[in-house]
Image (cartoon, rainbow, N blue to C red):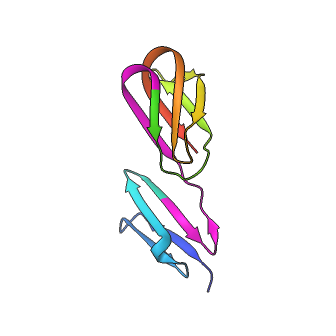
Amino acid sequence: MSSSIVVNEVSNSVSVTSVETSSIIANQKGNTVVVTGVIGGVSLDSNYVYTQSSPSATWVVNHNLNKYCSVTVVDSADNTVVGDVLYNSLNQVTLTFAGAFSGKAFFN
């Protein structure tokens, strides 16, 4: 039997077969299902979205992805913003920008 992850929109469920289910996490938010974990010894890619609600020129983010992530930042108008990324650890980064703003950081 092969490993599989099946998303059933009718029953609003996720089923996992022939994998180490203790290492699989499936979260549903609206119409999106995010699955993270290990299937057949291969780690699935995981991501994190951080929201900075109040304007700041420095964002310290704990993403807990256990890797040095690529980071894309957008302001509250969804314009891409360029800044400096300092990897404090595998799970935390400090983002520094020229000016204060609010927005989102996407970690992958």
Residue 7 inside the magenta-drawn segment: no
- Point 55% across, 82% down: residue: 18
Q: Is residue 65 above or below residue 71?
A: below
Tell whether 38 sits left or right of 60: right
The foreground one among 98 and 86 is 86
Residue name at image x 55 percent, y 44 percent = 89
Answer with the quarter of the image where residue 53 lies. top left
Residue 87, relative to residue 32: is it above or below? Answer: above
Query: Is 40 within the magenta?
Result: yes
Which of these two is toward me, 42 or 18? 42
The image position of residue 42, as x and y in percent, is 65, 68
Task: Name the outermost residue toward the front.
Answer: 88
Q: Is residue 54 above or below residue 7?
A: above
| Residue 44 lies in quadrant | bottom right
> Which quadrant of the figure contains the C terminus?
top right
Residue at 59 percent across and 78 percent down: it is 3
Q: Residue furthest top?
A: 99
Residue 48 is situated, as x and y percent measured from the top left of the image, at: 49, 45
Residue at (45, 33) in percent of width and height: 60
Q: Position of residue 23 (x, y in %)?
A: 49, 71
Q: Which residues are magenta?
A: 35-58
Q: Quadrant of residue 41?
A: bottom right
Quadrant of the frame with the N terminus: bottom right
